[in-house]
Image: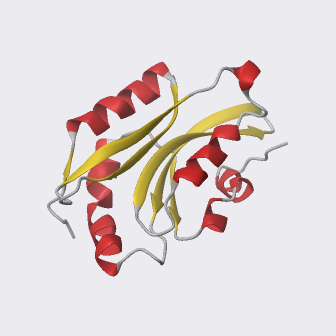
Amino acid sequence: MSSGVKVDPECIEAFNQFKLGKKDAFLLFGFNSNATKIIVLHKEVKLPDDQKKNKNEQWENLINMLPSNDVRYAVADVHYNTSEGPRTDMVFVTWAPETATIKQRMLMASSKDALKNALVGCRTTIQACCYPDLDLKSVVEKFKGTLD
């Protein structure tokens, strides 16, 4: 089902910069005021390694930016370990809390594929409706990895 909502070209440009330049830690997307376009709401600049407590510190920043009563999309890097060594992969996050209106959640569900298809290269999709759904340990397990 398609909502007719368009993906703003800035979303694709920001995503391509995210993939290539790696200067952003995550991207946050949402709808414009009249819900006709998906737009970039925030670009989180990556902290230098010497300013981070850990590699996934900015994952917590992403979670803290998700509103408790509105929908969002996000793309973020997740750092984890496998038996072959350290890895980093991109995830596509859909955030649709139960406190968002039914209209918002329906709009998100019907627009998700348009954005996801425009942002090629994410390894997995995380569908979250509450903050525990975004627990980093659970996310890393989807990659068959660990945080240690």
Scheme of image coloration:
secondary structure
Please determine whether, in this image, residue 40 is positioned above or below residue 2: above
Residue 22 placement (x, y as % from top left) = 51, 24
Q: Residue at x 33, y 68 (%)?
A: 109
**Quarter that holds the C terminus:** top right
Q: Residue at x 72, y 33 (%)?
A: 55
Q: Residue furthest right?
A: 148
Quarter occupied by residue 101: bottom left
Frontmost residue, 146 versus 70: 70
Quarter occupied by residue 28: top left
Q: Is residue 85 left or right of residue 90?
A: right
Please determine whether, in this image, residue 122 is positioned above or below residue 94: above
Residue 136 placement (x, y as % from top left) = 70, 53
**Quarter that holds the N terminus:** bottom left
Residue 77 placement (x, y as % from top left) = 57, 38
Residue 44 placement (x, y as % from top left) = 51, 34
